[in-house]
Structures are given as C-alpha cells and as structure tokens.
Image (tube, helix red, strand yellow):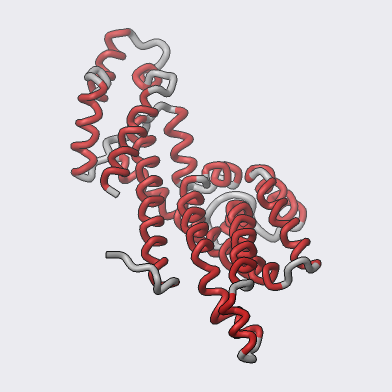
Amino acid sequence: MIPVILGISLIIFTVVRVIPGDPAYILAGPHATQEQMDQIRAQLGLDKHPVTQYFIFLKHLFQGDLGTSTRTGLPVIREIMTRFPNTLVLALASILLATVFGVTIGIIAGVKQNSKFDYLSMLVALLGLSMPVFWLGLMLMLLFSIKLGWFPAVGADSLKHIVLPAITLGANSTAIIARMTRSSMLEVIRLDYIRTARAKGLAEKVVISRHALKNALIPVVTVIGLQTGTLLGGAVLTEIVFAWPGIGRLLVEAILSRDYPVVQGVVLLIATVFIFVNLIVDILYSYLDPRIRYH
C-alpha cells in the first residue's frame, strides 16, 4: 500500500501543476504587479524547482500536514474534515441502497432466469447504467421536490435531504451490482454441489441461501468494494446538483481557484480511502471462501 500511495502522491502532484492557470495571478488579481506575484509565488513555494517542491510536499505529508489553502488561508486538513463526513454519509447511504436492492434483484433474476422479472430487472439495470448522474438527479428533483414536494431539493440539514442524492448516486452502482449478482448466481447454481444439495431434498430456499449465495458473493463483494471507493470520489456531480456540502464540491471550488494544496489533499484522501476499501475486500475473501488463505 505504501508504494501505491507514494505513486499516487507523485501523480497528483504532477497533474495539479500542469493545470492551466497561475495561482499567484488568481490570488493577486488582474491589477497586481510582477513583483507582487513573485512575492506570492515565493510564499507558496512555487518559485522552487518542482522536484524540491515534491519532496517538501512529501515531508509535510508524513507529518500529517497537507498545507494551507491558498483560497481561504485555513489548514487543508480542516477544510477536508469539515466536508468529508457529509460525503462519507452520502456514499455509505448510496452503497447501502445499491447493495440491498442490487443483490436482491440479482439473486431473484438469477434464480428465475428468462422470466419476466429477469428481463424487466435487467432492462431497468441497463437504464440505470445508461442514465447520466446529473440528468437523473435533475429528474428526481423535478418529480419528488418540485411536483410532489416529498423531499427537499438541496442542502444537507436532515435525513430527508439525503434521499434524492443517495438514489441518484447509487443508481449506477445498483445496476452494476444487480448484473454481477445475477451472473454469479447463474454460474454457481449450475455446479455439481448445488445439484447434490437439491438431490438430498433440501428446500430451494435453503439451497440458495446456504449453499449458492455464499460462493456467489465473492465477485459481488469485489464489485461492492470498488463501487464504495468510486462513490466516495465520484460524488462530484451529485453534490453539485443537490448543493451537497461535501468534498466533491470542495474539489471543484479548489480546481477553479487553482488551490493546489486543497486539490492535492482531497484527491490523496479519496485515493487512500479507495486503497483501504480494496484491502478490506481482500480480507473478506477469506471469510467467504475457506479455501482462500493469506500467509
């Protein structure tokens, strides 16, 4: 994990600095003199060689210091921790919704292959994969907020505020999980041990829940883990549409203002969380399948 995080830090550092625009010019304003802009660059450390800047960045990173926002003057870690809990709540609500509905739909569709439910559920899943997040969010807002008035359109002040953003963000993941669960179930229920369990006279519910589902969940858990990391980093459009005060909006604001420290901090946090989620998924494999052991 450490080499991966170091590699990500180098990529983030490099990409941020090739973004067009000069932070010193943005901070100083269009009427600033060259001397004023040079002074700001020196304060930000932008006058040093890029390699030197990177090692200074790494040194501060290992000390838990992500720098200071050039836009607000506040510590980056404070800026992130103010917004990150909102994104975390939204991502967890979305993945919970996606997991419950995706796995349930996938199991039923797999068990009842070629039925009307199977065709309908996979059609809905295809629509869920095809719809752009911002369009779905606007349509949900139009129907449930403006027309029906059931849920608030923007903000994050109550549990009602999370419903529409969670559905919007989780729709794509629900479709992916449903399709993967169906595919995995179809593969497992054709295996010999499932036929043996049925030959013993076990009830179909017992065969599916105790014998088929556990083995079918291994690729599904992988997808759920990947989707959890994706939702944490991919909530940008959803947060903008619903004015959700998360790190997605913070990242957009930082990019527009060329706030290097905040951009680096947010992207590094998202990447680190993604790596840890994948580690947890790898560990879960050994519990789902006793044949898998880590030494």
- Can you say whether 279 is above or below 75 in the image? below
Q: Does residue 160 appear anywhere in the picture?
A: no
The structure residue drawn at horizontal position 36% and vertical position 57%, both measured from the top left corner, is: 279
Q: Position of residue 33 (x, y in %)?
A: 33, 8
Residue at 20% over, 31% down: 56
Q: Which residue shows up at 65% across the image and 48% down it?
A: 137
Give the total of numbered labels. 0
**Residue lying furthest right:** 116
Compared to residue 135, the image places residue 205 above or below, namely below
Closest to the observer: 261 or 83? 261
Q: In this view, does 130 lie to the left or right of 38?
A: right
- In this rendering, position of residue 137 left or right of residue 220: right
- Residue 290 location (% of width, % of height): 40, 74
Towards the viewer: 87 or 132? 132
Of all residues shown, which one is farthest toward the top?
34
Q: Can residue 247 be seen in this view?
A: yes
Picture quadrant of residue 260:
top left
Q: Residue 77's x, y, as percent?
A: 31, 44
Q: Which residue is drawn at 64% across and 56% down?
A: 175
Q: Where is residue 262 in the image (x, y as percent from the top left)?
A: 36, 36
Give the vertical position of 255 relative to 234 (above or below).
Answer: above
Residue 114 image-quadrant placement: bottom right
Quadrant including the C terminus = bottom left
The outermost residue toward the bottom is: 201
Is residue 186 or residue 239 the one in the foreground? 186
